[in-house]
Image (spheres, helix red, strand yellow):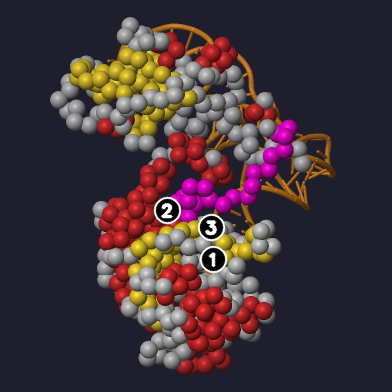
Amino acid sequence: MAHAPRSASRLRAQQPSRHGGDVVSASAGDVPYRFPGTVPAASVASGREALAPGEGSGEVVSVAGRLMLTRPQGRVAFAELRDWSGAVQLFAVASSTERFDELTKLALGDWVGVTGEVVRTKRGEVSVQVASWSLLARTRHGFGDKWRGVHDPDLRYRQREVDLWANEGVRETFLLRSRAVASLRRLLDERGFVEVETPVLHPTPGGALARPFVTHYNALHADYYLRIATELHLKRLVIGGFERVYEVGRIFRNEGLSPRHNPEFTSVEVYQAYADYEDMMELTEQLVAGVALATLGTSRLVYQGRDLDLTPPWRRATMSELIEERTGAAVALELGREELARIASQLGVPVADGDGPGKIMLEIYEKTTESELWGPVLVVDYPLEVSPLARDHRSKPGYVERFEPVVAGRELGNAFTELTDPDEQRRRLEVQAAGHAAGDEEAMVVDEEFLRALEHGMPPTGGLGIGVDRLVMLLADAAAIREVILFPALRPERRSGEEDSDQA
RNA sequence: GCGCCUCUAGCUCAACUGGCAGAGCAUCGGACUCUUAAUCCGCAGGUUCUGGGUUCAAGUCCCAGGGGGCGCACCA
């Protein structure tokens, strides 16, 4: 098919650059190797209250960034220079700015470094009055509508480098993400947790119910799987004596894309020896509220127009209680499969033949209740049947000690009192493996390495996993996960040679 | 994977029940010594996603394909 893909030819320069052919050829290799000594653009104006309009400060600074607005005005010119701190106005005067004519011909998006005195213009804006300047890079493409930016989602995500300049707030979101992850690490480190890195390539996928990506390890002549969780290796480290351990890392699940799902995403998993899920509840609250406090200065936020108070303690309620609140139906495993199936169909929740009572109960919860929970709420006590890695509830038969923090109608994580008994774990995995053999591609398989590790003795342990992307969505008030992942998964761009007309 | 919606200039968007494909910004040329999305004058810019069909006539209607969005399913 010979048509150009949607974005292949976009944002191309449609006419020869205003730099002119001679300048292009002359300056292509002319860019300096460094432009040292710059200050952040946003810092230039701060503390200049005493500077009167039309006055110079006597202080000379250098700034560098992209020209994003230009206002040539004859023998003077103004421009907005942006860097990742913000923006500062440049002021150029033909009589005192070197290569003035060339400067006024720069295109929106060109990178420049300038040096000059900090002044306040007659109209009152603190500016750098350009004395000398260097072109640092030219752009061959525009950055969208200078007022409205770029709205096409395909273009925004495929060309994030453009989105970052074209749309206000995008850079801030990703800086926020970076600060959130840094503060998450700091909070864990402060509590004595040690960060580790475990393998991404697994011979057997495990630690979660999900379909894996498959790859091939040539030297071993074997198929390997991209990890779907960090869980099993981290538990092996607890067995090895890492009493408090965590990993922040990329997880891969071979599933559909949605505003809340990206096939590769970031999780943090935390394991604490001698602790149970109650301890993990407290840790969850502290981490989530702590990250909010560290990044936004408050644990009371507004998400998608609705108040959201992450301040601990959070409400704790059992799955049964929450289902009953929402639907009026009393749902518990003790009712038995038949009765649960009846309730499910009454509520319009489909039941598959192979589903046991635990699966049916979870289905009812997920279809009727979860998305309605604004939270934050810790949903407590899951059916054993759907929790192969969690320890039996100490007082409720058929349940395990597991909870999920739910915020804004979404699971933010998953945590349990870990199952440490190797025999029970083997039985649970064998049930999973039977399901897998029967065609359930998300069921687990038996991981002998993990079971052997458990046989060496695992202390009582609490484990917690949090979806980092979803946490950042809350902090950034992002409706879609793509807004907090720099390069979200997209179909590959199809380009045939002749379509690359913008390269010609 | 299924359903619904969508795709028009580099960007953001118009174009009535089918009737000459347009604007703002950007780009390019010009004017301008204090602008703030500067302003003013001018040039240029299109396979209306692709391919087929209906029609005197298709951006518009129909079919197929592609990209994207949303929903369902799966999951964090």
Mark 2 or 3 closer to N-term?
A: 3
- Label 2: which residue? A478
Residue type at mark 3 is Glu
Quadrant holding the C terminus of chain A = top right
Q: Give me the chain letter of mark 1.
A: A
Q: Which mark is residue A228?
A: 1
Residue at mark 2 shares a chain with residue at mark 3? yes
Q: Going 60% across and 72% down the picture, which residue do you hit?
A: A442
Q: Chain of mark 2?
A: A
The amino acid marked with disc number 1 is Ile
Extent of the magenta region: A478-499
**Where residue A265 sits in the image (x, y, percent)?**
50, 58
For disc 3, the marked residue is: A264
Q: Residues within 10 Å of mark 1 (few under 14, many from 20)?
A: many
What is the distance, in whole Å, between disc 3 and disc 1 at their CAs?
9 Å
Q: Position of residue A225 (x, y in %)?
A: 60, 64
